[in-house]
Amino acid sequence: ARLLQARGALERGAAQQALTYARIADSLTRRGEDHGRALVFVARAYERLGARDSARAAYSRAASGMRPIHDWLTLRAAALTRDSNARAKLYDRLRTPIARERSLFAEAKPCSRLRRICTVRLSSLPVIGR
């Protein structure tokens, strides 16, 4: 029930309320997929509130317990990670070829958001449209 309340609060734009519901759900479910789902809602709420480090940590914890979407959650955590070495370690955890390919594009996002010059090996990017 708390997960549904968290989801509804996120959809209404009430991130603080969503965080409260998601944290309650997290405290009630310490294992399994329900725990992972609760952590995803915690992460989403933190992200909406601008608490990037807390969101990153929650996505990483959720990824460890949710094998089917591990790579997606890891990419979300990487997108919130400022340190390029820490992002590289997260990318090393990716299991599927499509996620590893996506990491190349995901790497461009934090670079542009942080307005820093990033070195991207353009030759390693897949060619699209050929």
Image (cartoon, rainbow, N blue to C red):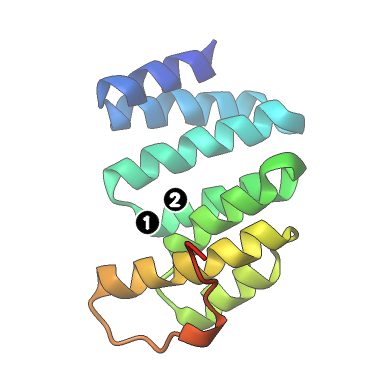
Q: Which mark is residue 29?
A: none
Residue at image coords 47%, 80%: 84
Residue at image coords 55%, 71%: 126
Residue at image coords 39%, 72%: 108
**Does the rendering let one see residue 121?**
no
Q: Amino acid at mark 2?
A: Ala
> Helix or strand or loop: what does disc 2 sit on?
helix
Neighbour tally class for label 1: few under 14, some 14-19, many 20 plus, Cα within 10 Å: some
Q: Amino acid at mark 1?
A: Arg
Q: Which residue is mark 1?
A: 52
Q: Position of residue 71 (x, y in %)?
A: 65, 53
Residue at the limit of the structure toward the top, as seen here: 1
Distance (Cα) linking label 1 and label 2: 5 Å
Picture quadrant where residue 49 is located: top left
Residue at the limit of the structure toward the front, as seen here: 130
Foreground of the two, 85 or 94 = 94
Q: Is residue 88 left or right of residue 48?
A: right
Residue at image coords 33%, 22%: 11
Q: Which mark is residue 55?
A: 2
Foreground of the two, 96 or 91 = 96
> Helix or strand or loop: what does disc 1 sit on?
helix
Badge 1 vs badge 2, beta-carbon distance below 8 Å? yes
Q: Quadrant of the N terminus?
A: top right
Q: How many marks?
A: 2
Foreground of the two, 116 or 16 = 116
